[in-house]
């Protein structure tokens, strides 16, 4: 979605699919002020509960992903042993190794090191709302944007099911980053 001011000056977020002739038309829109207030409250609620003591960085990798990388590492070791024992030809070894290493790279691509201490410095705890509002008043919007990007992977807007003129909060899905 893209932000777009209306003729009355209010900001709306509208689906950007309407620009492409090869895609189905999308006329989804949501009021900017209501959406931004909702996301801000979700972020502040999370910041109030978040404990980053001692955490210099957060690596996002699930336990299943870690196990898959470990299994692929063992498979690479077995392939090397087979090649060393001349059970497989060099071309076969290289092809199989390439496949396994591609799987590992695909999983590792999900890994993000995010500097929690720097981005969230002073933003967490019971005073999170006061701190957030102080940054808003000071115009530190880049900092607040960085915090939102750290906390949330995506904000998805579904179809509106509320009557005209009412904001439908149930259509907002916030995907939180693994912290």
Image: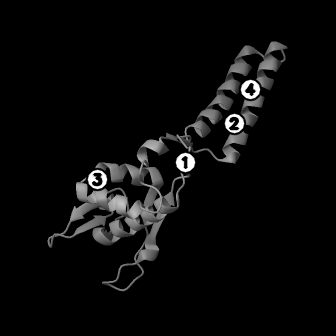
| Gap between marks 4 and 2 measured at Cα | 10 Å
Tell me the quarter of the picture where residue 55 sits.
top right
SS assignment at label 3:
helix
Q: Residues within 10 Å of mark 1 (few under 14, many from 20)?
A: few
Q: Earlier in the sequence, mark 4 or mark 3?
A: 4
Q: Residues within 10 Å of mark 3 (few under 14, many from 20)?
A: few
Name the foreground residue: 100 vs 157: 157
| Gap between marks 2 and 3 measured at Cα | 38 Å
Residue drawn at (81%, 19%) of the image: 81
Residue drawn at (59%, 37%) of the image: 108
Tell me the quarter of the picture where residue 93 sits.
top right
Q: Residues within 10 Å of mark 2 (few under 14, many from 20)?
A: many
Residues under numbered marks 4 and 3 in contact, where contact means CB atoms less than 8 Å apart: no
The residue where tag 1 is placed is 53
| Gap between marks 1 and 2 measured at Cα | 29 Å
Relative to 76, 147 lies left or right: left
Return the mark for residue 69: 2
Q: Earlier in the sequence, mark 4 or mark 2?
A: 2
Residue drawn at (77%, 19%) of the image: 80
Q: Earlier in the sequence, mark 2 or mark 3?
A: 2
The residue where tag 3 is placed is 141
SS assignment at label 4:
helix
The x, y position of residue 106, in whole percent, is 59, 38
Whether residue 19 is visible here, answered yes or no, is no
Residues under numbered marks 4 and 1 in contact, where contact means CB atoms less than 8 Å apart: no
Q: Earlier in the sequence, mark 1 or mark 2?
A: 1
Whether residue 91 is visible here, answered yes or no, is yes
| Gap between marks 4 and 1 measured at Cα | 38 Å
Q: Earlier in the sequence, mark 3 or mark 1?
A: 1
Return the mark for residue 76: 4
């Amino acid at each position: 979605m893209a932000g777009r001011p209306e003729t009355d000056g209010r900001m709306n977020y509208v689906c950007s699919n309407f620009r492409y002739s090869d895609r189905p038309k999308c006329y989804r829109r949501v009021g900017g002020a209501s959406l931004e207030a909702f996301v801000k409250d979700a972020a502040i609620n999370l910041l109030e509960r978040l404990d980053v003591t001692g955490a210099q960085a957060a690596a996002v990798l699930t336990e299943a992903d870690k196990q898959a990388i470990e299994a692929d590492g063992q498979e690479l070791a077995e392939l090397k042993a087979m090649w060393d024992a001349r059970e497989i030809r060099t071309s076969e070894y290289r092809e199989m190794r390439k496949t396994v290493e591609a799987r590992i790279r695909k999983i590792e691509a999900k890994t993000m090191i995010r500097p929690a201490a720097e981005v969230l410095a002073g933003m967490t705890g019971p005073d999170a709302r006061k701190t957030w509002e102080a940054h808003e008043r000071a115009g530190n919007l880049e900092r607040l944007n960085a915090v939102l990007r750290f906390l949330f992977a995506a904000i998805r807007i579904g179809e509106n099911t509320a009557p005209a003129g009412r904001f439908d909060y149930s259509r907002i899905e916030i995907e939180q980053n693994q912290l």
